[in-house]
Image (cartoon, rainbow, N blue to C red):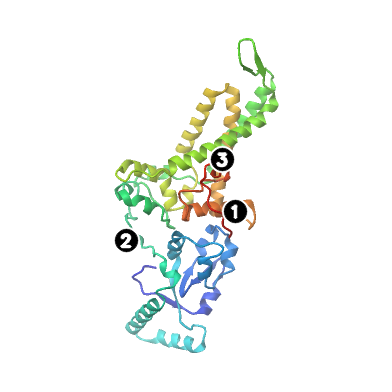
């Protein structure tokens, strides 16, 4: 709802009726929100919101156990649909409300404006008034046009803007071909890469099984490589990929581009900034094919130059499998609903906090392992 539009009014009885997955409303003070579209995205899972449907969630937003960030409050404003009728539970209030519907349109508009103004004055100090309504028409960029060529002009405002997420699809380029090349459906990752993983695994294992592979240390001394070395090398490659992914995420995706450099700002937005601006744009939750091929290819070249070819291939295969698992888990963390108390439940909460509150910390996707030695772990909070 646009801030300039007069709010609709709902009774408590009307709000309470919307308590299912198909239609879920909550209250924040006297403000009414339709959070149906957010159920699957909520880091705490659908059940936490459904259990509070039709109720005031002000205390839950403030915590404990978890105090929601200003970005979370700003995000919630996108689902605002109207106001709760004062004393709406009484029959008298319902009668007054029915009578008001029969009044002249001008009288109704005047009454709504007066009531809204009075409510805002009375509740000026309420916690939910700290929320910042999202008015996309007055944003720093024009959302009706492609964003790729606009964000560089934000200069020193870019970093704050890109870390204020919105629930809105992003269009990067005006050219349909270029725009299509930036999107990837999640299922194409396993469809393209898993057959390659299976083939390389078979190739590495059968090559080692021949018993002719040796690690040459000198002209007179070499170590035969047994076929059972393949699983440890595979897992080592997977582990190495997790470190590479952490470094890319932290030092490339989360670099703070210089405010005066139009091109670095644009590059940052294309690589990862657009994902933080619109974290639930499903078509951009996995690596685009071109970028994925570049990362995977570089990983292979490095290993091939460091290790004997077949050993490097074994580690590369494990790293490639780790990449596929990473991308699939990333997608699930945004759209899945893991069971409360499970490992994936905690990882989802951890990752979504990275989007809404701790953008400079918490880089773990499949694991938080590297966050601890490098001191980028998000403070532990319960949901």
Q: Nearer the viewer, residue 226 or 218?
A: 218
Tell which circle, 2 or 1, labels the residue nearer the N-terminal end. 2
Residue 180 image position (x, y, % from top left): 42, 44
Q: Quadrant of residue 253?
A: top left
Q: Is residue 372 above or below residue 86?
A: above
Q: Nearer the viewer, residue 46 or 162?
A: 162
| Alpha carbon separation for disc pair 2 and 1 | 36 Å
Q: Is residue 247 above or below residue 64?
A: above
| Residue with the mark numbered 2 | 138
- Mark 2, Cα crowd under 10 Å, few <14 / some 14-19 / many 20+, is few
Q: Helix, strand or loop at disc 2?
A: helix
| Alpha carbon separation for disc pair 3 and 1 | 21 Å
Q: Helix, strand or loop at disc 1?
A: helix
Quadrant location, the N terminus? bottom left
Residue 101 image position (x, y, % from top left): 41, 84
| Residue with the mark numbered 1 | 346
In the image, taking residue 310 as reference, residue 108 lies left or right, namely left
């Amino acid at each position: 709802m646009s801030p300039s539009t007069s709010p609709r009014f709902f009774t408590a009885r009307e709000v309470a009726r919307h308590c299912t997955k198909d239609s879920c409303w909550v209250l924040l003070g006297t403000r009414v929100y339709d959070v149906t579209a957010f159920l699957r995205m909520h880091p705490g899972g659908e059940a936490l919101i459904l259990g509070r449907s039709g109720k005031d969630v002000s205390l839950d937003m403030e915590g404990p156990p978890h105090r929601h960030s200003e970005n979370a409050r700003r995000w919630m404003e996108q689902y605002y649909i109207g106001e709760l009728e004062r004393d709406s539970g009484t029959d008298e209030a319902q009668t007054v409300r029915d009578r008001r519907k029969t009044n002249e349109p001008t009288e109704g508009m005047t009454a709504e404006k007066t009531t809204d103004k009075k409510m805002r004055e009375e509740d000026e100090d309420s916690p939910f008034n700290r929320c910042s309504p999202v008015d996309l028409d007055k944003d720093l960029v024009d959302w009706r046009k492609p964003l790729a060529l606009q964000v560089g002009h934000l200069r020193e405002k870019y970093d704050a803007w890109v870390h204020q997420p919105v629930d809105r699809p992003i269009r990067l380029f005006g050219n349909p071909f270029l725009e299509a090349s930036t999107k990837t459906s999640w299922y194409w990752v396993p469809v393209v890469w898993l057959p390659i993983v299976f083939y390389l695994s078979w190739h590495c294992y059968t090559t080692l099984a021949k018993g002719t592979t040796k690690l040459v240390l000198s002209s007179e001394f070499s170590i035969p490589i047994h076929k059972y070395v393949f699983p440890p090398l595979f897992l080592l490659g997977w582990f190495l990929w997790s470190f590479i992914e952490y470094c890319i995420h932290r030092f490339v995706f989360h670099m703070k581009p210089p405010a005066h450099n139009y091109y670095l700002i644009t590059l940052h937005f294309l690589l990862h900034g657009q994902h933080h601006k619109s974290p639930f744009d499903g078509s951009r939750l996995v690596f685009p094919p071109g970028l994925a091929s570049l990362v995977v290819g570089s990983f292979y070249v490095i290993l091939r130059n460091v290790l004997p070819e077949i050993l490097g291939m074994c580690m590369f295969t494990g790293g490639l499998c780790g990449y596929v698992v990473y991308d699939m888990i990333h997608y699930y963390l945004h759209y899945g609903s893991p069971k409360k108390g499970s490992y994936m439940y905690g990882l989802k909460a951890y990752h979504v906090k990275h989007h809404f509150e701790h953008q400079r910390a918490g880089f773990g996707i499949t694991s938080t392992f590297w966050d601890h030695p490098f001191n980028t772990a998000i403070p532990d909070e319960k949901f």
